[in-house]
Amino acid sequence: MKKLLSIVVPCYNEEESIPVYYDAMVKEMTEMNYIDFEIIFINDGSKDKTLPIIRDLAKKDKRIRYISFSRNFGKEAAILAGLRASKGDFVTTMDVDLQDPPSLLPDMYKGIVEEGYDCVATKSTSRHGYSFIRKIFTSLFYKIIGSISKIEMVAGARDYRLMTRQMVDAILSMTEYNRYSKGIFSFVGFDTKWIEYENQERVAGTTKWNFWKLFKYAVDGIVGFSTAPLIFASFIGILFCFIAFIMIIFIIIRTIIWSDPVAGWPSLVCIIFFVGGINLFCTGIIGEYLAKTYLETKKRPVYIIKETESKKRV
């Protein structure tokens, strides 16, 4: 009996990409006739014709399944929903814009079945198509999180990876609300093989990741998998207390020896603003951790399903 491979594909306003992706996957599934497939499209609250297109595909191809959210919950929620719905012995997550080449699937499958890995993951060796600012901040993010996190964060790692059912079950056992999949994949461990490839351009449509969204995503990754920012805030507080103590001693000595009164309100104002800014910065770090804790304690669902291929909207 053939094994089943589940492919999880998050979609948000991807009406142009889905037909191109489906054609590419049909070709790949035909060539990989030694395994059965199911493709699970996750409609993440799209406003275009994404859902009708997915419905039509599900009608004509029984290998197509889908989940449609009640609104946009984000890519992390879509990945989680797809993993929960997957039935395969192996599961992979892919982008629908073909920046994750389907042609890598045979080698990824071979890495698990023949070489004994639990996961075969991909990473891009270049950042073609990225803006100059995005390249700088992406590189900076991986350097920061790589140095402060206790788990391995591979630079250039993508969500595109093939996993065994055992690894997927381990991922699903982590029920946290604030999710950062790249960190979760690393946290659960398991033997992972990395495949490198050149970054691919989108086949259609436009990216939904602007600078602000990427920045928030990076903050989620740092806060979710490191407490180093809290230690940094404490260190800054201790440092400024030490500097203030030294300055007090300096002022006292200068006044006693040279009878030099304390002068210069402009410098005092600058110091107040500087220290106040540092204080607010450190308070913001603590607030970010408190906010994540607050969201976890509310126990809200990560996503809400409105429709699936087996439960149509009435």
Image (cartoon, grey):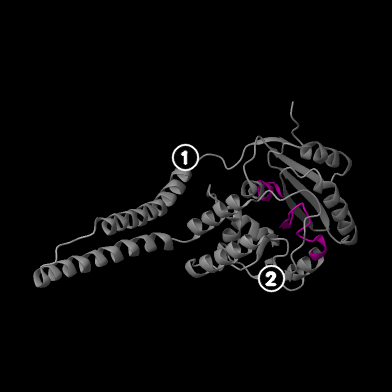
Asked which quadrant contains residue 104, the reply is bottom right
Q: Is residue 293 left or right of residue 208?
A: left
Specify the farthest residue to the top. 314
* Label 1 sits on residue: 298
Q: Which residues are magenta?
A: 81-104
Query: For the residue marked with disc 2, what is the amino acid?
Result: Trp
Q: Is residue 301 left or right of residue 293?
A: right
In depth, the one of 75 and 274 nearer the eye is 274
Q: Is residue 110 left or right of residue 302?
A: right
1 or 2: tag closer to the N-terminus: 2
Q: Secondary structure at mark 2?
A: strand
Badge 2, how many Cα within 10 Å: few under 14, some, many 20+? Answer: some
Residue drawn at 83 percent across, 59 percent down = 35
Residue drawn at 78 percent across, 48 percent down = 205
Badge 1, how many Cα within 10 Å: few under 14, some, many 20+? Answer: few
Q: Is residue 87 visible?
A: no
Query: Vertical placement of 176 versus 131: above or below?
Result: above
